[in-house]
Amino acid sequence: DIKIGASISATGPAAFLGDPEAKTLEMLVEELNAKGGINGEKVELVLYDDGGDANKARTFATRLIEDDEVQAIIGGTTTGASMSILAVAEDAEVPFISLAGAIDIIQPVKPYTFKTPHTDRMACQKIFEDMKKQGISKVGLISGTDGFGASMHAQCKDVVGEYGIEIVADETYDPKDADMTAQLTKIKNAAGIQAVLNPGFGQGPSIVTRNYKQLAIDLPLYQSHGVASDGFIELAGKDAAEGVRLPGTALLVADLLADGDAQKPVVAAYKAAYEAKYKMPVSTFGGYAHDGFALMVEAITKAGSSEPEAIRDALESITGLAGTTGVYAMTAEDHLGLDLSAFRMLEIKDGGWTIVE
Amino acid sequence: MLTVEGLRSRYGRIEVLHGLDLQVDSGEIVTVVGANGAGKTTLLRCLSGVQPVSAGKITFRGEALTTVPAYKRLSRGLAQSPEGRQIFTNLSVEENLRLGAFLYSDDRVQKDMDDAFAMFPILREKRNLAAGGLSGGQQQMLAMARALMGRPSCLLLDEPSMGLAPIIVQQIFDVVSGLKALGVTVLLVEQNAFGALKIADRGYVMETGTITMQGAAAELIADPRIREAYLGI
Amino acid sequence: MKLSSKHLTLLVMATLIAAAPFFFPSGYYFRVGALIFVNALAVTGIVILTGYAGQISLGHAGFAGIGGYACALAPVHLGLHPALAVVLGALISALLAYLVGRPILRLKGYYLGVASLGFGILVAMVLNNERELTKGPDGIEVADLGLRGLLKDWGLNLSNGEFWYAFTGICLVIGAWIALNLFNSPTGRALRALHGSEVAAGTVGIDVARVKLQAFVISAVYASVAGSLTALQNKFVTPDIAGFMHSVEMVTMAVLGGVGSVPGAILGAGILTLLPQVLTVFAEYEQLILGLVMMLVMIFLREGLVPSILRKIRGRGE
Amino acid sequence: MSEFLQFLFSGLTVGAVYALVALGFTIIYNASGVVNFAQGEFVMLGGMITVFAHAAGLPIPLAALAAIAATAAVGVALNKLAIEPARGAPVVSLIIITIGASIFIRGAAQLIFDKQIHSFPAFSGDEPIHVLGATILTQSLWAIGGAFAVFVGLWLFFTRTILGRAVLATSNNRLAAQLVGINTDFVMTLSFALSAAIGAFAGVLITPITMTSYDVGLGLALKGFAGAMLGGMGNPKGAFAGGLLLGLFEAMTAGYLSSQYKEAAAFVVILAVLFFMPQGLFGSKSTDRV
Amino acid sequence: MSLLQIERLGIAFGGLRAVHDVSFSVEPGEIVSVIGPNGAGKTTLFNMISGVYRPGSGKVRLKGEDVTGMEPYLLAKRGMSRTFQNLQIFQNMTVLENAMAGFHLQERGPVLADLLNLPSSRKRTHMAEEGARALLTRVGLDRAADREAGNLSYGSLKRLEIARALAMNPAVLLLDEPAAGCNAVETEEIDHLIAEVAKSGVAILLVEHDMKMVMRISNHIVVLDHGEKIAEGPPEAVSRNPAVIAAYLGTEAADADR
Ligand SMILES: Nc1ncnc2c1ncn2[C@@H]1O[C@H](COP(=O)(O)OP(=O)(O)OP(=O)(O)O)[C@@H](O)[C@H]1O
Ligand SMILES: Nc1ncnc2c1ncn2[C@@H]1O[C@H](COP(=O)(O)OP(=O)(O)OP(=O)(O)O)[C@@H](O)[C@H]1O
Ligand SMILES: [Mg+2]
Ligand SMILES: [Mg+2]
């Protein structure tokens, strides 16, 4: 048997991300084994819930490697957890695919660590690219202080200059805050402001979006990929969400993809299976786990062995693998294998998603 | 009226009452005297139900009381003015008294309160003060008054004269005697054995958890053993 | 009798720590052991503050955070050896405890709880928000302690897990020894006295404010060192270490084991560290069972594990 | 001016949320001296049960009533199954029981419901009310009004009814309370039922503003606790004022200083207040003498 | 210069003048009793002298030094010690440890020595334990030494407080109703103890409602009523003072019967 370990934040502050990830992995393993496994070998998934706690994640990583003796690890919903796991995995030379956003995970490149989600930086780039196209040069930021929001906030500030855009207001909110009108009022009153960007996930962005409408702020509102799910539209309300733009993955707009799109069959199949099994809409984050698992399976199949080093080498050589997030092309220097084209700029129209190109 | 048979009680593993027998007849004043740590307080706590009984039987007005929860005993007619006063320190004096009559909401409550104020005028003066701000003796008066608010038919008093000025001690003993006239039965634990025995009908002497002597109050006062051990004469 | 009970406790502890590895089926158990020891060390500090002196803190994780981040930052920015960073962290924690403790220790009960909570949240917030320095919520890497390498040079080759097991185990025994010393010392008696009655403590000459502050500082140092050890062991630290949940966890461990008892601290830490590890097999039911166990322990062993069990044993003995 | 007004509205909205949670602590605290850390879970249950009952077809008002009743039952169960069996345990042990209960309830909610974020429509629509250039949502007015109503109700309960005083007596001196004929077990049960119901009521009122999910309890409990302490634990006046003030501090700090450190600022204010008034704004000093 | 000198001491709670303009002094070896009706202000007076309350007016002088409003622990260092009307026992400690806590000023030392269990710390603990055991024997609690203090009966706790206060080897000792809760015989034991302590040169200030005891052992009596001093003098004089009889003793001289 092949043992794959996973440490995921199925509960805790990042449960919103981790829960669909855990569900996805469980579903995919089941599917795979039903189809006969990898090269005839069944796959066993050892799944732990680290609650988003880096310290716990490290313990589970140790447990996966030392006690469960897994051949590879997927997981690390949050960046902190991923950083903890990768330290253990690198030490023990076990391939590890992270599901967290930060670029630090794979930069500098570490031999055994890979990741599937786009980086925060790419999301920022995608957004600023779109803004630039719209002729926007002065933006306000309102970010969540959780890991996701803070990390993206930092990356956005880092790259914003490249697009000739200036940040004229910079506010934050706590992920549990109930009302952001105070921050938004300040942003609204910032001189020359042309658009607002809200990095964050969970209920925060929904509240921001509602408050945005409450204050009748008449500027384009950009959200991050952190809210790329149907739930966001529902929570923020159709009215308030109207016109919001965000960088999303193919998964969210499965139906709208062109027929020739390489990702179309993959996202359609995943979406159908997941929604049938769990009776809830897919989310971008579950998609990360889907891709991580697909990469791992592909690598093990290609390697024809479950030797860690062979898997690692195989991972590095994967090209053209279509996932929900994008089409992966790993190299020895690039352990992510995605570029900006994987993101699609989406806009909410009439309570649904549309692709803006 | 109140009968105690073979009462045993313990704190954790240490038994402090080793099979007490005691009886109080209706309308009587009975006093219990004994040295520090003899178990007098424990006995009263058993009677009011705040102390678990490990063996023995308590009967009150012909009904078994042993398993009746503490809060129901007042409605059966049993009130206690406990050791350490146990007033509601955060509530006002008036609220303390009102709670003494928690079971009642009729007009008599106000009348009883007026009586209490008449008995201890200082309490009227301090009626709105948090009871914790009272002096020690004033708190003792409040504890006594609160017990009376419960309209007991049998009153358990644990050292009611403690910390009171001589002039008030006298008054307390007068009040207790007066209760008798109202038909209230009293079980009185006192360190002021002399004063207690003077107003009591009968008395018990308690030593380390057992009754060692009992009899008519007058006899006990005269008994040289008692005079030496408890009255200091 | 008193003296021997202290030495007996330490002896039993040391023996258990030394003997347990013989029963470990895999390296992972060393990691769990080390986690238990580090937690127990922090909880021992709570025993001193809450168990002895009766003061509640809901912000002690703040000190753990300072200890942890001292190890992350001092080697990078000050060029300190990580071992010295532990000391620096402890000193900063002690200093902060001294400064914060002076005003807040006047408060009582829940009011002290909320004030210390505020302190913990402030620390967590700085760690979260001062990205330039701390790299924010995602955490920061921590230098290697280097002791393991040193031991290797001396011919003692331990795996990472084994090393941290041994090292934290030794730290715990020392920490427990100190706490047990304190219990039956003049200062310890002063602490417990003010727990009983501050007014009476004052009238026998105990400088209540000062002694309380001493307990606060000592317990802060415990938390700080525990935080440092966590960071060094993980070679990574996130602001969670200073989070409210971590503070609550410490207090819970202390109360579960028996808040005035040093062996209780270890047992409480052991249980609450192990339990989630065991419960992972129940996946979805983990939280449910964890909550249930906490309630059941407190209902049936209301003074906490060790004191309640001791009472039962003694009860049977007599 | 309109800016200030907007900050004020924001603060009142948030403050109403905190005040509602803070008020929930009052009764159990007054009956037992225990800060019930599961109070936040009551708020969560109020919101979640309403959401799911609504999804199952009940109209919102009915769903809300069902949620309040069910949560009150959970409160009673908590008392009967966990608090009462531990009677006589030290207060810290009881607090740990409530923490255990909060973890337990959260775990159960995650199984029974789900881990998604939910909400239901505001009672009177999403059209904000405009006042001098600032806006406030009608749901905020519901929350503020609800908090005020609960505050008045509690205040009357504790100062005007004998039962309310019996609750205070129970925590002040349980032994004496029994001696005057108070059924302290019943008082405890009642307190848990009322506190839980208030919590659920809060959950119903604030969910359209804050949204809800199985894990919102802890954060709410924390803020409610801080608000209650600022005002003075156990006093409904304190809970109401403390909660509102905390919300206002946060909004004003976010508006005029830094949104990053708004919570820090709020805690600094709490520390400052406690420095001068160690019992909170309206807390009474313990009068025990030596 | 008296050992303890009270000068025009006063305090008010809200509108109530609990103590007003009270002056007197206590010499070494002297027993001064303060008597008066309930609520006269005796305990409040004690609380001001011992630093538990800060006086509203007036001065307290100890060994000639102005110690008004000083914190209790500082007063303790200067030789003042007291017991409480509302018992203040260290419930979480054993009887022996309660008494040992009384030796705090003698046994305290550097915290570091205590943490590391240095010989100096052990020696101090040992010293306190010896002393405490001797004192417990003196008040008749030696057999209860290892019991949890919270488990003692009321009367025993009173004595434990006296032992703890004596442990400090005080120059001035304030006793607030030491005999409350004790029967006549037990009261006499306490009598002897107090007299003995006084004989060793300690200045004793006593509040007590047991007139027999007060008359027996006091050198001097101060009578308070409504916070003011209404009489003062040797026991015989005070007990015959009509104002004192009216306010406090009552006409029925109950004690005479005994
Ligand atoms: N809470 C308790 N736990 C353990 N033992 C106790 C407790 N309370 C009292 N005792 C013990 O029980 C015995 C009887 O105590 P009790 O208080 O009944 O005596 P008492 O006769 O009222 O004495 P006093 O005259 O001093 O009030 C004593 O030995 C006392 O130490
Ligand atoms: N903190 C306070 N708040 C309000 N009133 C107080 C406070 N402390 C004392 N008093 C009042 O001051 C007066 C004096 O009280 P004190 O305790 O000194 O009397 P005492 O002479 O010791 O009486 P007793 O003999 O009953 O112990 C009392 O009327 C009391 O109610
Ligand atoms: Mg007694
Ligand atoms: Mg007094």
Image (spheres, grey):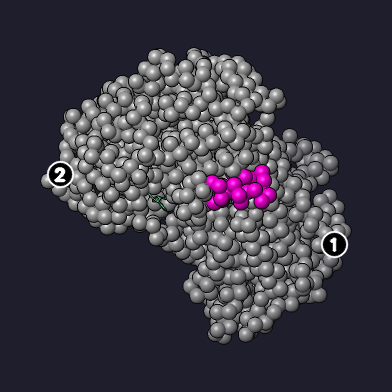
Q: Residue A235: horizontal and vertical position, in percent?
A: 74, 65
**Within the magenta stretch, is there residue A171?**
no
Residue C257 seen in this snapshot: no
Eyeballing the image, is C103 above or below E152? Answer: below
- Tell me: E202 left or right of C288: left
Q: CA distance from mark 1 to mark 2?
A: 83 Å
What residue is rendered at 30% in x and 52% in y? E228
Going by the image, does E220 lie left or right of B122? left
Assign a secondary structure to mark 2. loop
- Residue type at mark 2: give it: Ser
- The part of the image, by quadrant, that contains residue E91 is top left
Residue at left offset 83%, top offset 53% = A279
> Which of labels 1 and 2 is toward the front?
2
Disc 1: CA contacts within 10 A as few (<14), some (14-19) or many (>=20): few
Q: Secondary structure at mark 1?
A: loop
Give the magenta range. Answer: B94-116
Residue A299 on image: x %, y %: 70, 47
Label 1 sits on what residue type?
Answer: Pro
| Letter of the chain that mark 1 sits on in the rendering | D
The residue singled out by tag 2 in the image is E2
Identify the disc placed on residue D59. 1
What is the chief secondary structure element of the magenta stretch? helix
Residue B96 magenta: yes
Label 2 resides on the chain identified as: E
Quadrant in which the N terminus of chain A appears: top right
